[in-house]
Amino acid sequence: MNSHQVQQWMETTLSLIKENETTLSELDQTIGDGDHGVNMVRGFQAVVDEFPNWEQENTSAVMQKIGTTLVSKVGGASGPLFGTGFMRLGAAFKSEEGAWADGLTKAAEGIAQRGKVSVGDATLLDVWDPVAKVVQAKGTDWAEVERAAQDGMNGTKQLETKRGRGALLKERSIGHLDPGAVSSYYLFHALVQTMTKGEN
Amino acid sequence: MKKLMNDSTKIVSQFLDGLVASHGNLIKRLEGTEVIVRKEMIPNKVGLISGGGSGHEPAHAGYVGTGMLDAAIAGEVFTSPGADQFLAAIQAADQGSGVLLIIKNYNGDVMNAEMAMEMAEAKGIETAMVVVNDDIAVDDVENRRGIAGTVLIHKVAGAKAEQLASLQEVKEVAERAISNVRSMSVALQACTLPSASKPSFSLSDTQMEVGIGIHGEQGMSREDVLTSYEIAELLVSHIEKEVDVTKPVYVLVNGMGSTPLLEQYVFANDTVSILKKNNVHVEKMLVGDYMTSLDMAGISLTLFAIDEELHSLLQSKATTIQWTEVSQ
């Protein structure tokens, strides 16, 4: 992936999140405080706006800058979690060899560590972890990545939320998609679109 | 939804500017940040910072000043500020003796604070953190939220730091206070975020939400609305189980944003008579909007069991926007 593709990835993510801003916030209203959509749009808008300043940077540096921008501009719990994901990806992209498998695995580990979450807690990790595992097992098979991300997101509907404000609802949280998992799905969906452009 | 505002995306920044314009004798804004700092720092004093999402005014900037906080960070409404903002506050508050972060127990706040502490340690600044979790509405202690009781932690830790105690000593007193402070709340009407078109949830004219937090999230149960006296009985009965009421207590009756003082004092009167009936020694009553939830209507009750040192720390002088001599 070159830095131009990273830019496309971020622009596509932003437009997906923007289109679905109200849905994301409404999901968050059910189990949280109702601002996930606003926060994610603010963060990814800041990332897209910063790109002209990162023209000289390589893929690794750009991903790390995306990470720090998300920490700073998304705020809340999503900022450090998505931010950590990108910082870990960026570190892995210092070498192209196996960067996706290594980076996504370390990103999922970083998210688990930072958020003190496990797979099955109905959080964004339930999308990041299966995506990392599928790339680890099968390489960058983008159709598989799409499927893993989508299944991971849908899976949070059946799960009881164990972390974040949603956890306070206990069994009442079952039946709702986790907003962070949904925005993670958009992120990976945008990645798949970027990487498969022109293939079909 | 009508709000007195210009632009929901600039509301926090414009609030901070308004605060400085009104109270420039006490505070200033750290340029390029969402951080309010005490105007005059004390050399060698442990720095005390707090912060979190906005929407809880006067918390936390209203507690910056002599004898309380050195810096407060204001995130977007109900959203933790980023780690970079926490770091800026830590750097501003550091006077050579380290910095204590007083954080309310929310995942986002804790994560951003921890990231900032790692960055500060890398810059050679000693830091420590205490996490306030006074809301007993949540059974699971690990997930208990920090609500109005946090203000009392600001006060005791602030007073201890003002005596030039060490970081460890300030942290210990804050932790002792945290283990003796418990709160619970009731909402009569939900709040509406500046960026949202409708309230976070809806309550009919005959319902109240029990065990509400301070972010418009739904509470633990929805009940038929009770009288002020009955609500006081309900909250006291829960909180009394978790606070050592054989000790004298400070009582904080806290309005959630849209609760008239008329009602707050009715509730305060009910609370004090119930506590008296239960032979609890009320050392001091504080009544007012200390930790709000935007325009939510409702009340939180906090009981703080004190010992001699905590009492003297509470009584010592503090000059901030919200905590003034009247509170002593």
Image (spheres, coloured by chain):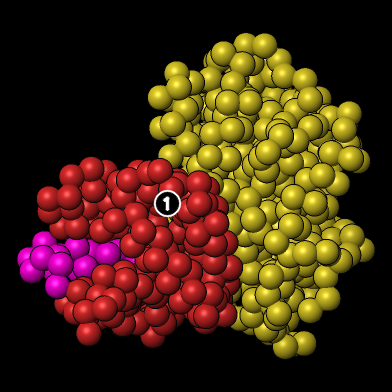
Chain colours: A red, B yellow
Specify the quadrant of the image occupied by residue B50: top right
Q: The disc labelled 1 sits on which kind of residue?
A: Ile
On the rendered image, what quadrant is the C terminus of chain B found in? Answer: top right
| Residue labelled with disc 1 | A66
Q: Position of residue B212 (x, y in %)?
A: 62, 67
Determine whether, in the image, residue B122 is placed left or right of residue B151: left
Residue B178 in view, yes or no = no
Up-down relation of residue A161 to residue B103 (above or below): below
Chief secondary structure of the magenta span? helix
Q: What residue is drawn where x is 66% and y is 40%? A: B33
Question: Would residue B71 be counted in the magenta stretch?
Answer: no
Q: Is residue A132 magenta?
A: yes
Magenta residues, start to end:
A120-141
Which of B220/B129 is in front? B129
Q: Is residue B80 visible?
A: yes
Q: Position of residue B283 (x, y in %)?
A: 77, 39
Q: Residue at x 69, y 24 (%)?
A: B159
Kind of element beneath mark 1: helix
Chain letter of disc 1?
A
Outermost residue to the left: A137
Q: Nearer the viewer, residue A150 or B48?
A: A150
Q: Residue at x 46, y 76 (%)?
A: A16
From the viewer's perspective, tell me whether residue B318 is left or right of residue A143: right
Front one among B32 and B24: B32
Residue A17, horizontal then vertical, whole percent = 48, 73
- Tell me: residue B1, above or below residue B82: below
